[in-house]
Image (cartoon, rainbow, N blue to C red):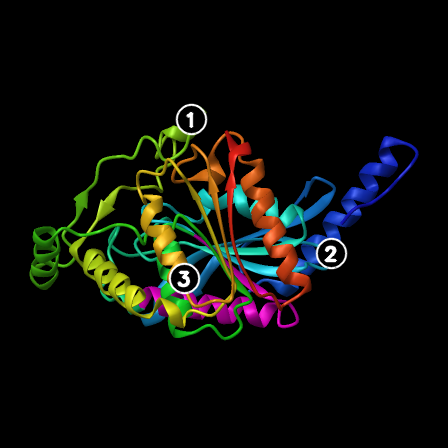
Amino acid sequence: MRIRTQGSPDLVQSARRLADYAARQWCAWRSCHPGEKQAAWQGGVTLLSSEGTFAGTHGAELFYRSLVPVTSPKAAVIILHGLGDHSGGMQAISKYLCEHHYATYSFDLRGHGKSPGTRGYVSRWEDYRRDLHAFHQIVQELHADLPLFLVAHSLGGLICLDYCLHEDTGIAGLAAIAPALSYTFKPMEKWLILLMSCIKPDYTVEKPVHSRSARGSDRNSWNHGDSLRHQIVTPGLGRGMITALSSLQKHSSSIQVPFLLQYGTADRVTPPEQLREFFARIGSRDKQQIAYEHMRHRPFDEEGNSAFLADLLNWLEDRSTSRTSNSDTTIHCGSCL
C-alpha cells in the first residue's frame, strides 16, 4: 500500500500507523493458520509477515512463513528451499516479489528448519509431494481468484518438478533455480544407498560444506550464524532422489506447465550441462532458460543478484497477466558478472 502525504511528520506517521492497523486486520482474516503476524513498511508497500504451522501428511506440523502485500496481490507464489536450507534462506526472493505485489508463501520441508523430523531424512519420497500438495491447497484457497506459481531451488526444484509430473492442476508456472537434476549416482554409490535404505534409512551422514554456493561477503559461508541450516543426508533421502530422478528422466515430456530454468554457469553443485539437456526434453510449450555467467548455486543470494531477481519477476509478470504463451527461449546473461 502506497500512501502519499504532505505536511508534518506526525501526519505521515499517523497515516503509516493506519496502514499498519489495516494490515494487521487483513492478516488476521487471511492467515491460513494462527501464528505470529507483523506488518512492515518496505519500498512504499506494507508487507504482512506471518508464521505458523500447517498439517502435512501423516499429521506432521510443518512450519511455514508468509509475506503478503496489503493491497491486491497480482499472484500467489509458493517458494520451496533446497537441501539443508529452510524457508528463511529464501527471503531474498520472497521479499523482492512481495515488494512487487506478489503474495509469497514458503514452508520448511520435513527434516529441515523448524519442521519436525530427522535432519535430511524422508521415509517416503511421496511425503514431500503430499506435503507440497497440502500447502498448495491452503494457498490456493486463500487466493482462489489469483494465478499460483511455484518457485523452487535445488532439492525444492526436484520436488516441484516431480509434483508437476503428478499434479499440475492450479499451477500457473514453475520457476526452478538450479534444480537437483544433474546429480548422478555412481553405480557403487547407488547400490550402497539402496542397501542402507533397507537396513537403516535414517542413518545420518554430514556432507562437506559447499563454500562456493554463492559469491561475495558472508553468503559464501553456508551456515554462518544460521543454526537452522545443516549438511546432513540419509539413505532414505538418497533412495527418494534416485526414484524421483529416474521418473523425471523418463517422463520429462509429460510436464506441461510454463517453465523457467535459472542457473549459474559456475555452479559446481548442479552442473549446467545436464540441466540444459533436461530443459530440451521437457514437454512444456512455454519454457525459458536463463544462464548467469560466473554465478554459482545460489544466484539469488549473490552480490549483483538484481538481474536474476528482475528476470524472475518479469517472467511472473508476463504469466500473471496472460496465461497463454508458446515459446522456447535461451538467454545467457553476461551482465551478472
Q: Nearer the viewer, residue 148 or 84?
A: 148
Closer to the chain start, of discs 3 and 2, is 2
Q: How many numbered discs?
A: 3
The residue that mark 1 highlights is: 218
Badge 3: few (under 14), some or many (20 or more) residues near its Cα, within 10 Å? many
Badge 2: few (under 14), some or many (20 or more) residues near its Cα, within 10 Å? some
On whether residue 158 falls in the magenta region, the answer is no
Alpha-carbon distance for marks 2 and 1?
A: 34 Å
Element type where label 2 sits in the image: loop
Element type where label 3 sits in the image: helix
Residue at the extreme right of the image, as rendered: 7
Closer to the chain start, of discs 3 and 1, is 3
Give the amino acid type for the residue marked by disc 2 in the picture: Thr
Q: Residue at x 70, y 39 (%)?
A: 43
The residue that mark 2 highlights is: 71
Residue 337 x %, y %? 50, 29
Give the amino acid type for the residue marked by disc 3 in the picture: Cys
Residue 196 in which image quadrant: bottom left
Residue 111 x %, y %? 30, 54
Whether residue 56 can be seen here = no
Alpha-carbon distance for marks 3 and 2?
A: 28 Å
The residue that mark 3 highlights is: 160
Relative side of 178 to 52, left or right: left
Alpha-carbon distance for marks 3 and 1?
A: 29 Å
Q: Residue at x 93, y 34 (%)?
A: 7
Closer to the chain start, of discs 2 and 1, is 2
**Residue range corresponding to the magenta coloring:** 127-152
